[in-house]
Amino acid sequence: MFADTASVIIKSGNGGDGHVSFHREKFVANGGPDGGDGGDGGDVIFVVDEGLNTLYDFRHRRKYAAENGEEGKKRNCHGKNGEDLIVKVPAGTVVKELRSGRVIADMSGDNKKQVILKGGRGGLGNQHFATARMQAPKYAQPGKPGIELEVKLELKCIADVGLVGFPNVGKSTFLSRVTNAKPKIANYHFTTLNPNLGVVDLPGGGGFVIADIPGLIEGASEGVGLGHEFLRHIERTRVIVHIVDAASTEGRDPIEDIYAINKELESYDPTLKEKPWLIAANKIDAIYGESDAINKLKEEFEPQGINVYPISAVSGQGLNELLGAIEKLLEEAPKDTYVFEQEYFPEVEVKAAEDEGFTVEYDEKENMYVCEGPKIDKMLGYTNIDSEKGFLFFQKFLKENGIIDKLAELGIQEGDTIRMYGLEFEYYE
């Protein structure tokens, strides 16, 4: 089963906590602090696996998590680092942050391996906090948490040539005739549901990859039908081939079809109109008697610099001329694979979210002041307020960040109670 999208949750490992311990040895009455540092959490790393061509495996597993780092040990022993999580994806996979749709990574071109989420750093052991005045610190630094993110994976076919056209114009038949691909072929009045890839082998050892982009319908660029599911696969192609039913076997006007599809392509991504393209006027074997359909196509598009090639995907008539024209366009087209730039940086975005301010309110029912917010929660996690030094450090944090000033504005008095995430303090100036 082909699958070109999937949504999963990925999480890097938490850093291990620093350790609190003191050197104990016979004949050594008061050994110094020897708590080791916690291990770093494992990273989440995406790697291209050339043997994969679908995202189907991601439909059966929802969450992927790297290993947490271990807590530090006594005798200055460092906790073990968490194992990295390697996630294998097919080439052409774009990783996006689910809510915003911004690109985190594009596993295409030379980008075969990328760290998507960094693991949390391990906390420092109590040995790092010894000073001349505080020779036996009883606190250590907690490990930093990993990052959890819901991402959308999109597989965008990497092909030289993209075939576009309305349903039942003969794209699948054409692909099966000129490549080794074996798509299902029938007189369907709906579209192929999956993109098919095939390799064209040319005389002299040359060749190129063709993608049969599932048939488009009007409104596809606005998400009508499966529009966006199909259009994403045309973005990486270097040359576009419009296939039309020149015989109008279903009563469609091939000229109107071409303009309709061009409109959908441009609406989806304006840069698509800059790609080189040509027209394959298919089903000439079904034209009986006199018909000026081919001449009308040429009169309409050749003055615009777009060549029209009459073909029959069934009989093979005109295919060599068309393939030669495609090869020539590819030689002239830029050879670089289109790679999406990174737009979302998890470490920066998550840190910004963690550092979003705070709230200070008076709870009349409980008769106390309540201080909450990611900034306060994070600082509480890194501070041992049971120690004198830690408590003074936390007071300094409250003052420097304007929390004390906000409490004063609300009219706090000495002896009033402050609650912060389940902890309660009496206020003294």
Image: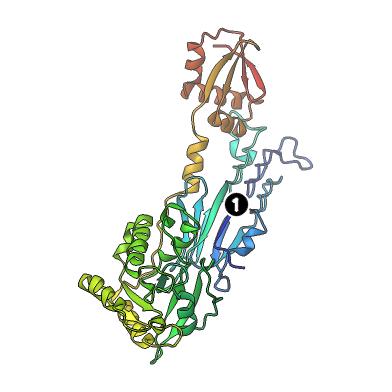
Residue furthest right in the image? 26
Query: Residue at point 69% right, 38% down?
Result: 20
In the rendered image of this protein, does residue 122 appear above or below residue 234? Answer: above
Horizontal arrangement in the rendering, residue 184 relative to residue 67 (left or right): left
Horizontal arrangement in the rendering, residue 374 relative to residue 421 (left or right): left
Query: Residue at point 62% right, 46% down?
Result: 15
Q: Amino acid at mark 1?
A: Ile
Choose between 384 and 359: the one closer to the eye. Answer: 359
Choose between 249 and 59: the one closer to the eye. Answer: 249
Which element is circle 1 on?
strand
In the rendered image of this protein, does residue 222 appear above or below residue 4? Answer: above
Can residue 132 be spotted in the picture?
A: no
Residue furthest left in the image? 303
In the rendered image of this protein, does residue 313 appear above or below residue 229? Answer: below
Choose between 99 and 328: the one closer to the eye. Answer: 328
Can residue 270 be spotted in the picture?
A: yes
Q: How is the image coloured?
A: rainbow
Task: Identify the residue position indicated by label 1 in the image.
Answer: 10
Point out residue 2 in the picture as x, y percentages from the top left corner. 58, 67
Query: Residue at point 50% right, 58% down?
Result: 226
Residue furthest front in the image? 289
Choose between 6 and 246: the one closer to the eye. Answer: 246
Q: Could you tell me which quadrant the N terminus lies in?
A: bottom right
Point out residue 377 in the picture as x, y percentages from the top left corner. 59, 30
Residue 26, picture quadrant: top right
Point out residue 257 in the picture as x, y percentages from the top left corner. 36, 66
Q: Could you tell me which quadrant the C terminus lies in?
A: top right
Tally of numbered tags: 1
Point out residue 213 in the picture as x, y percentages from the top left corner. 46, 68
Horizontal arrangement in the rendering, residue 261 relative to residue 172 (left or right): left
